Image (tube, rainbow, N blue to C red):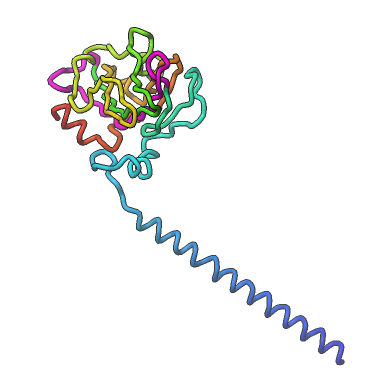
Amino acid sequence: MRVRATAATAALLLAALTACSGSEEKAETNPSAAKESVGKSSKKKVDCSDEPLSQAEWMKSCSDENGDASAGPEEGAGAETLKLGQPAQTSGDGGTGVLQITPDTVVFTKKATGETARNGVFAVVVMKDKAMTAVAADEPAPVSGGGWQWRAPDGETIGFDSGNASTVAMDKYSNADPVQPGSWQWRSQVFDLTPAQAKGGTLIYVDGDEQAHAWKMPATNSGPNVADVKAKLDF
């Protein structure tokens, strides 16, 4: 009788300990889930198309809304494909110096600075060029085979001088002097595209060492300076 009683008591104690452990685990798990849920529900909704945002805030809140720009090699690109807002280290004209180039904002419009897109849509891209070494650095001239191109979704390459692109200029974003050490400047590139070519193309830049750099472009106005660029385009 004493052996049976001891066995029964041990079984009851084991059951109580198991129940207690389950309760503690549940108590540890639920608060985290509730906290995570509250964090998600309280996240501020950002208007990515018009609000003036810092580059960091735009990358955090908006970059994923504009499609997945893969972080791996894109077929046929010969370069890693980055997202709008991500920097690339590039060689300066003639291989002199290093420019960190960051495409910042893209705006699509039929008219800009009094001109109408011959092919239907202007794609206006503004970027930051920053000198990264102790010597001045510049983008290579298009005549040398370097500079900017737009690759359409079907693979067609559109040059910087397409349609009426060269007639669009914005003072703030039209710097063209070599970038001095320790400084950066705004630049811009305009493409005159058909509506189909503008739907999610790829921005290509060939640097001073003839290396290609690529950024996947959203199909809608995107970036932290959309409002300012639109204002400069006489919207």
Residue 157: within the magenta?
Answer: no
Outermost bottom residue: 1
In the rendered image, residue 52, in percent from the top left (x then y), is placed at 24, 42
Residue positioned 27% across, 42% down in the render: 53
Relative to 187, residue 5 above or below? below
**Residue 118 colored magenta?**
yes
Name, please, the residue furthest toward the front.
134
Q: Quadrant of residue 204?
A: top left
Tell me what residue is drawn at x 18 percent, y 15 percent: 167
Q: Which residues are magenta?
A: 91-119
**Position of residue 176 measured from the top left corner of the image (x, y, whole percent):** 26, 19
- Image height of 128 relative to 140, above or below: below
Q: Residue at x 33, y 11 (%)?
A: 142
Residue at 23 percent across and 26 percent down: it is 173
Residue 46 screen position, x and y as percent: 29, 47
Image coordinates for residue 49, horizontal then vertical, percent: 26, 38
Quadrant location of the N terminus?
bottom right
Number of numbered discs: 0
**Left or right side of 185 for 11:** right
| Rendering quarter of residue 20 | bottom right
**Residue 93 lies in quadrant:** top left
